[in-house]
Image (spheres, rainbow, N blue to C red):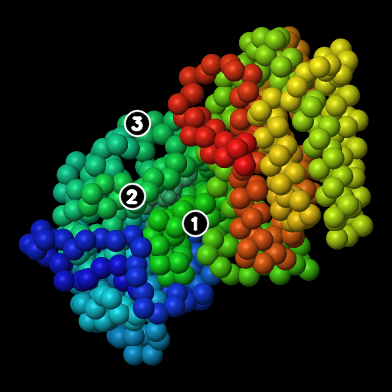
Amino acid sequence: MSARAPEDSSAGATGPAPVPTRTVTTGTVPSRPRVLAVAGSDPSGGAGIQADLKSIAAAGGYGMAAVTALTVQNTQGVRDVHVPPATFLAAQLEALADDVHVDAVKIGMLGSAPVAEAVGAWLDGLPRAATTTRPAVVLDPVMVATSGDRLLDPEAERAVRDLLGRVDVVTPNLPELAVLAQEPTVTDWAAALEQARRLAARHGVLVVAKGGHLGQAAGSAAGAEHGAPDALVGPDGVLVELAGERLRTTSTHGSGCSLSSGLATRFARTGDWADALHGTKAWLTAAIRAGEALRVGEGHGPVDHLVGLRGLPADTAPAPAGPGSGGDLVALWWEDAAPVRAAIDDLAFVRALGDGTLGADHFRTYLEQDAIYLREYARCLARASELAPTRAEQAFWAGGAHGALVTELDLHTRWLGGEPQDVPASPTTSAYLDHLRAAGDDYATLVAAVLPCYWIYQDVGERLAARNHPLHPYAAWLGTYADESFAAATREAAAILRRAAAAADARTRDRMAAAFRTACEHELAFFDQTGLPGPSGAARGADRRRAEPVVAG
Ligand SMILES: Nc1ncnc2c1ncn2[C@@H]1O[C@H](COP(=O)(O)OP(=O)(O)OP(=O)(O)O)[C@@H](O)[C@H]1O
Ligand SMILES: Cc1ncc(CO)c(N)n1
């Protein structure tokens, strides 16, 4: 399962091996990989082996753990560290290797140089690359906890650096990246990617550069403007870059541990580091978002590793395992669409609607197209009602169709002073409607295609409604967004989609994911069709282009 040979362990002494992102295996990829975490223990359950085991399970693997160190730790900090003899860790690793076929290894906190050296010796004894039996190895070079406490002796940094040539992927945060590269800590993302590339080239290893610490070094506490990007970087540069929304939360304790063990598990299932990082990032973002609700501790709380299990009705089995299906698919699809949603918030039209500077002509053009859209959208909801497998779902979609025609369309025509006359559907409106109709008789795909219209409207609307005030020129309009019954309908539509996804086979789930994503992109194009120029036009271009093939097809 390994992507590379372990020979070049002495930094820079030999030429680094090429680092492919897609591993050619002679065996089959296991659907339930056996994944070993070699890491420290965090009694608060958010980081270390406790996080790893939950993360591995959430990604569909079987988790095992060899403990390198014990910490006295809660969400506020690390009070003490006890490192048992390295020989005891070596005995744990040996006992496992004697008995269990390990598909992937994640290495976390090592604590001391002798422990790091014992792990290195164990890695050296594993079967060589290009066989079916060598596990993929991810190293999370843990040096400092989220709370700021040290978790590695300074003299052990060299021993961790020595492991770089023996692993497939290393996942440093920005300060750890600098220590490994033996260079100053960088403060911007472009410099981080360049530093990661140098490290990858020097050691023949793939580097996942993590943007969680961006903004901190520059002194801005939240760093919201930096986002939370991650990237997979090889010796020749960036292989995959994932934009990430920076969530305003303190629930990030153990996010690095969770990322690395999720990555190792997903790689063992797919054989592709880029896919594995993509899936892990989508899951982790959902897990960070859900962390606060766990209400664990007063400091940096844990992420909710099992976010994928929440919200599934008790009578519904989780979706069967398969690449990319890690529990709550609908939450993952929503997270996957985060860049599209961010681009909607960023549109000149949406900003101007929020701050009240939107011209009446632009608003009118938007409403006219939306009225045309709503009449057809109501027909799609009526079609969902026709296809619904239960009476409750049939009634729900019939109610949705009625609501779109009566409540929403009435509002439009009142605002416009009558039904739009002789206004043709724009290419953008037609393309969106064609996409909805393309689901045909496939109920699950149709439900996936119609949901973004509810969800994005409700989500964007919530933020717009928060900016309303009595003197706002569109006060009456923005007021309609804060409607709790619409929010409830959105939740119900999402629950129906979740049930449909849980019952669907893998091919249908793929179709559903594409229908959901494309509908999100049509939402972006729809909001943007009034031709209002905005500062972020270049960023939006990519999303618009993705929606275009649907117009052609
Ligand atoms: N506020 C946030 N919002 C969204 N994602 C975040 C946030 N903070 C961290 N992440 C993500 O969590 C992962 C871990 O990132 P980070 O750079 O914080 O690693 P770390 O310092 O090793 O983590 P740890 O907190 O476990 O020590 C990355 O995927 C990062 O993008
Ligand atoms: C045991 C352990 N490993 C790693 C981290 C880093 O988050 C931590 N806080 N505790």
**What is the number of the mark on residue 239?**
2
- Mark pair 3, 2: CA separation: 29 Å
Determine the residue positioned at 88% across, 15% down: 418
**What is the number of the mark on residue 219?**
3
As rendered, which of 375 and 362 lies closer to the eye? 375
Dot 2, how many residues are within 10 Å of its Cα: few (below 14), some (14-19), or many (20+)?
A: some
User: Would residue 253 be visible to someone looking at this image?
Assistant: no
State the image coordinates of residue 58 (x, y, percent, origin top left): 55, 65
Tell me which amino acid carries mark 1.
Gly
- Mark pair 3, 1: CA separation: 31 Å
Q: Is residue 139 above or below residue 189?
A: below
In the rendered image, which residue does mark 1 sit on? 279
Determine the residue positioned at 56% across, 51% down: 286
Q: Secondary structure at mark 2?
A: strand
Q: Earlier in the sequence, mark 3 or mark 1?
A: 3
State the image coordinates of residue 288 (x, y, percent, origin top left): 53, 50
State the image coordinates of residue 102 (x, y, percent, origin top left): 39, 80
Q: Nearer the viewer, mark 3 or mark 1?
A: 1
Q: Quadrant of the N terminus?
A: bottom left
Q: Secondary structure at mark 1?
A: helix
Q: Is residue 354 above or below residue 214?
A: above
Dot 1, how many residues are within 10 Å of its Cα: few (below 14), some (14-19), or many (20+)?
A: many
Dot 3, how many residues are within 10 Å of its Cα: few (below 14), some (14-19), or many (20+)?
A: few
User: Would residue 61 be visible to someone looking at this image?
Assistant: yes
